Image: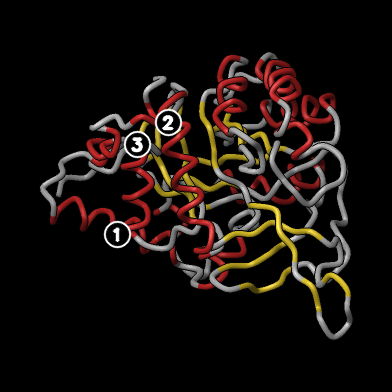
Amino acid sequence: MADGNLTTKLGPLTLKNPVLVSSGTFGTGIEYQDFFDLNLLGGLVTKAVTLEPRAGNPPPRIVETPSGILNSIGLENVGLKRFIEEKLPFLQSLETAVIVNVAGTTVDEYRQVSETLSEQPGIHALELNISCPNVKKGGQAFGVDPVLASELVSTIRSATHLPLIVKLTPNVTDIACIAQAVADSGADILSMVNTFRGMAIDIKKRRPTLGNVIGGLSGPAIRPLALFCIYHVSCHVNLPVIGMGGISDAAHAVEFMMAGASAVSVGTANLVHPDTAARLVSELNNYCLENGISEISQIIGVAHSDSPPLCGGK
């Protein structure tokens, strides 16, 4: 197969292939460099960066569940200054798209981080995290209210020239409503879905297992739910989508792309098999060869061909 058949276009952002790694599951990449050549990726999404360093939530922070994990990390990170000084040089050395996840507690914090990052070379896009369920201020507070989401995205749109990805939470009544609000306010790309809120209880201690009580559920358990969200939003909102939620092989990736995603992101699977994303690139290449597909873009949204009632509004 000729090189380039996996090339993926996400609005203003072009990727060498549709496989990314999700924020919060891949650090800043340096942690995974001994497992595979990171340049094989279509893109790398960093752990969230906030204006000031964050210590994160109290432990325990991760609980294994049937077919997934609950995590409550709390956006622990070194802060903007140290990220630029200590983490960014490695990312700038990569030959793949570098996407920095941006988080904050106020609109102004998001703006300051976005403006400063936009001045740095080697960053190809920003991903606004308005969907983390594990922090008490900011994060998901913006992602569950279309008015707040719209105001935030409008502010950041005017603060950066970089492609703007908005990461959405599924913990809302209708995710398409939030998606349309951020689309109307200047988002270029949607990233979805973040984790579903959940919890676990230690029956011996008679207390919640996680130090933060609640956490975000990810992994194979959420795949059918995430797939529906992708399908639903792509019916109603005219923006490219990066799909995620329990993806660990090519069949899962193809499902998400047929549902409407233009690219996919590997999250929890990285914690189980660190080379999952690299394997996925190879598997997608083989899938195209075996099925006579000359361009991976040919499968995007094909599951919508019959336009069931769910998509009647598009």
Q: Is residue 150 left or right of residue 12?
A: right
Residue 119 position by quadrant: top right
Q: Decide which of tag 3 and tag 2 comes sooner along the chain.
A: 3
Residue 224 position by quadrant: bottom left
- Structural distance between the alpha carbons of marks 1 and 3: 15 Å
Q: Which amino acid does label 2 sit on?
A: Ser
Q: Name the residue under label 2.
A: 234
Nearest to viewer (mark 3 / mark 2): 2
Given residues 311 and 13, the one toward you in this image is 311
Mark 3, other Cα within 10 Å: few <14 / some 14–19 / many ≥20: many
Q: Decide which of tag 2 and tag 1 comes sooner along the chain.
A: 2
Q: Decide which of tag 1 and tag 3 comes sooner along the chain.
A: 3
- Residue drawn at (28%, 54%) of the image: 284
Q: Mark 1 points at which residue?
A: 282
Mark 2, other Cα within 10 Å: few <14 / some 14–19 / many ≥20: many
Q: Is residue 9 left or right of residue 44?
A: left
Q: What residue type is labelled 3?
A: Thr
Percent x, y for residue 292? 10, 47
Q: Which amino acid does label 1 sit on?
A: Ser
Q: In this view, does 266 lie above or below 312?
A: below
